[in-house]
Image (cartoon, rainbow, N blue to C red):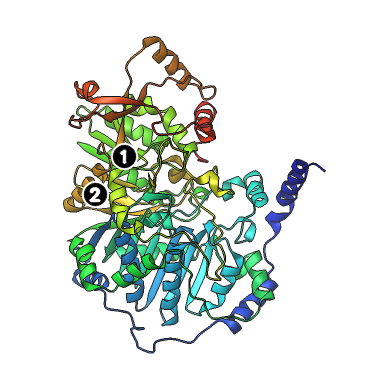
Amino acid sequence: MHPRWIALAALLAAILVLPGCSVSPSRIHRADAVVAADVHRELDCERIDHCGIDSPLLAAARQALADSTEATPVNVVTLLNDSEAAMVARLNLIRAAQRSIDVQTYIWDQDDAGQLVLDELIKAAQRGVKVRILADQLFSFNDAALLQRLANVHADLEVRLYNPTFHAAQTSAVEFGASIVCCFHHFNQRMHNKLLLVDDAIGITGGRNYQDRYFDWDDEFDYVDRDVMVGGPAATAMATSFETFWRHKRATPLTHLRDVNHDILVMQGSKPWPAPHYAHPQRVARVQSEAEDPEWLEEALVSQTLRTGRVDYFSDLPAKTTQPDKHSAQEFTAHVMRMIGAAQHEVILQTPYLVLSERAQAIFAGLRQNPSPPRIIVSTNSLASTDAFAVYAISYKHRKHYLKDYGFEIYELKPHAAGPAEDNEEAAADEGPSETTRDGTKARRRIGTERGLLGSHGDARRNRPAPLTTSGKRFGLHAKSIVVDDDFAMVGSHNFDPRSDHYNTEAGVIVYDARFASELRDSILRDTQPENAWVIAPREQNSLSMAIGDVSASLPVFDLWPYRYATSYDLKAGCTPMRPSDPAFASCYTPVGDFPDVAISSKLIYTRLITAFGSGVKGIL
């Protein structure tokens, strides 16, 4: 039989059979009994504080809680732009925990970053801290044998996977395709929240997942990302949100997963947790040391912390697409929209994916109609910097609307941006060639992206950025942040796109402090500087070409005209940066093409094709 027919038959079989393949109650009961008998219960610490280290971060959070009243809350807030500080803060808080650690994430890889954090959490459980990990199944762990070991590693550690495909931890290519065909609505809804919460007193939330590229540790491609660390009453809302997700029916215990359940019953008995094998052990050792270095913590974290008042943590409810009639299901999404709609003079938006939902379009169109419209500055990815070229194609299609109808000033990140490259230099010094797992074998790389279903599964090469005409380590934007009127600001997981609005659950914090807003504003604007970004602006007008382009762009399909309203510009040497609306702009900026630095490749062709034919799949993307 032809291989294509075999694949089709397998897909049909999966559609018909797999949705009903949940684990029987008797097998769950047996697996639970095996885990209860085999799980390690010995503690490395007998003290009441479970041997948590002294942490200035946790101490500041506890002081904020002690100083707070219901009428006058006190929170401590630290913006985590630097990736090394973001990792060190996590390690310090995990080691300082005395009672509980709750972790929520979309991606958990088994590279250095993923192994390091997981190992630290296990050590916390072994000294008596209650540790709970809730990870979206699609791009987390992907290893039933690993999860079987985690089920037994210690009684104080519990792992659940959110919305598993066909009741399993691992998803094959056939199951992935079957999920799209048979139960797309359910499969397409993912948990995109990121949270690390310690002792219900201090938490970290934002854009970073547990994978090397979110901490400047990938050899080829790293993200410009951002978190915020908040201690005080806002942590109470974080705890409530995590508990809601943890108890939801889509948060699936390991014994309820077909493949993990099988391994538990077959491989009865537990072994000691093996020491991790890191690709770059010197780099890991450095951050482990910094996590307990008072001087380093003071300089990089404590001195950067603001003591402030109101901070709101918001999160959508789990499975929000099944509850469209419940306003609270999209609580965080609604607050983000209201923030922008209230703008008076300036909105600074940083998002990896500039694809606006209908609701967002209406808000920006309304702002544009104000007698004095606010300035809208957008920092986003170029095709050269993104690993989500399909999404970029939709953004590219609607450039004219963004510039003319909404008045956006758009800056697209350069792949070799000078700012991120400079930040990455110290970490790069410790890079090495190898990458191994705990058992010493070559690591299986399963690169996850945050772009839902298309372009996010299977061959890892498909999730790499488009080939470039230049060489060197590259960077892509992943931070999701908004500053409104220099007054208040948001850092979270929301991409301000249809997927974040309608499908994924999102979370983040809104900080009502002008100092924090100013710090975040400066951070975003740094990424828009000429050494870091190209400016998107109207090209020199050719009336016939522009008229044809307008007609082509208005078509849902067959948008094939290659000459668009706008293109990318770079600042000329000796000129001062200026806005595209400045009369002298044309004399100081050089057009560099629609896709600067991108080599001719299949991904460039795909981008053009999706621009022409893919406008109807924004929600999937």
Is 549 rendered above or below residue 523?
above
**Residue named by callout 2:** 520
Say whether residue 598 is left or right of residue 70.
right
- Residue 103 location (% of width, % of height): 42, 65
Which disc, if any, is residue 379? 1
Is 511 rendered above or below residue 303?
above
In this rendering, does residue 230 appear at all?
Answer: yes
- Residue 120 location (% of width, % of height): 41, 73
Q: Quadrant of residue 267?
A: bottom right
In this rendering, does residue 342 appear at all?
Answer: no
- Count neighbours of disc 2 (C-alpha within 10 A) and say few if under 14, some if 14 to 19, many if 20 or more: many
Q: CA distance from mark 2 to mark 1?
A: 13 Å
- Which of the two discs, 2 and 1, labels the residue nearer the N terminus? 1
**Residue at screen point 65% across, 65% down:** 259
Image quarter hosting the N terminus: top right
Q: Residue furthest top?
A: 544
**Residue at screen point 30% across, 41% down:** 349
Q: Residue furthest right?
A: 1
Say whether residue 220 is left or right of residue 169.
left
Query: Foreground: 406 or 137?
Result: 137
Is 404 rendered above or below residue 531?
above
Residue type at the position of mark 1: Ser
